[in-house]
Amino acid sequence: MAAGGNIRRKGDGKGRQGGRQKGTPNKVTKETKELLSNFVTSRWEDFVLSYDNIKDPEKKCQIMTQLIPYVVPKMASVEYKGDIPVKTLADELDEISGEKTRK
């Protein structure tokens, strides 16, 4: 134990206790991504030739399906719960004008 009661606790409001600064990328992760990117890029033509030589359309479709998420982001599903009030055009006009236009 440190003398004088200088014990740091998580969330004590004194900031980070060490390590990388917030937002600083991990060096190993960055280097690994660069290596993998270079590997894939340098062998892309080989991949395309191999893909073109596949005769089974089901296998080609399976490969394409596995690659798509790396190119096109997945769309999130949206659920409507029915608690959003639907306004008519007349309702919108009433709101804008500040008066009731119909009975």
Image (spheres, rainbow, N blue to C red):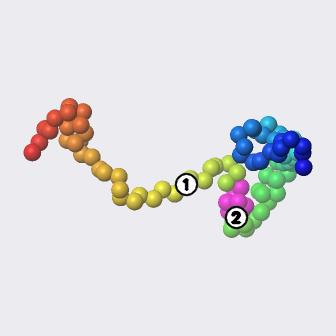
Residue 75, placed above or below residue 5: below
Residue 64, placed above or below residue 10: below
Q: In this view, does 77 lie to the left or right of 42?
A: left
- Give the labeled residue for mark 2: 62
Range covered by the magenta-colored residues: 60-67
In the image, what residue occupies the spot 78% across and 57% down? 51
> Which label was assigned to residue 76?
1
Does any portion of residue 39 appear in the rendered image? Answer: no
Q: In this view, does 51 lie to the left or right of 98?
A: right
What amino acid is labelled 2 in the image?
Gln
Give the CA separation, mark 2 to mark 1: 22 Å
> Could you classify mark 1 by the number of other residues whose Cα lies within 10 Å: few (under 14), some (14-19), or many (20 or more)?
few
Evaluate if marks 2 and 1 touch, with contact meaning CB atoms under 8 Å apart.
no
Under circle 2, the secondary element is helix
Q: Position of residue 100 (x, y in %)?
A: 14, 38
Check the image and name the residue furthest to the top: 97
- Mark 2 or 1, nearer chain start: 2
Quarter of the view holding residue 4: top right
Quarter of the view holding residue 58: bottom right
> Could you classify mark 2 by the number of other residues whose Cα lies within 10 Å: few (under 14), some (14-19), or many (20 or more)?
few
Quarter of the view holding residue 16: top right
Residue 59, placed above or below residue 52: below
What amino acid is labelled 1 in the image?
Ala
Q: Position of residue 66 (x, y in %)?
A: 71, 60
Under circle 1, the secondary element is loop
Residue 2 or residue 53, whichever sits in front: 2
In the image, what residue occupies the spot 90% across and 43% down? 3
Overall secondary structure of the magenta stretch?
A: helix
Does any portion of residue 36 appear in the rendered image? Answer: yes
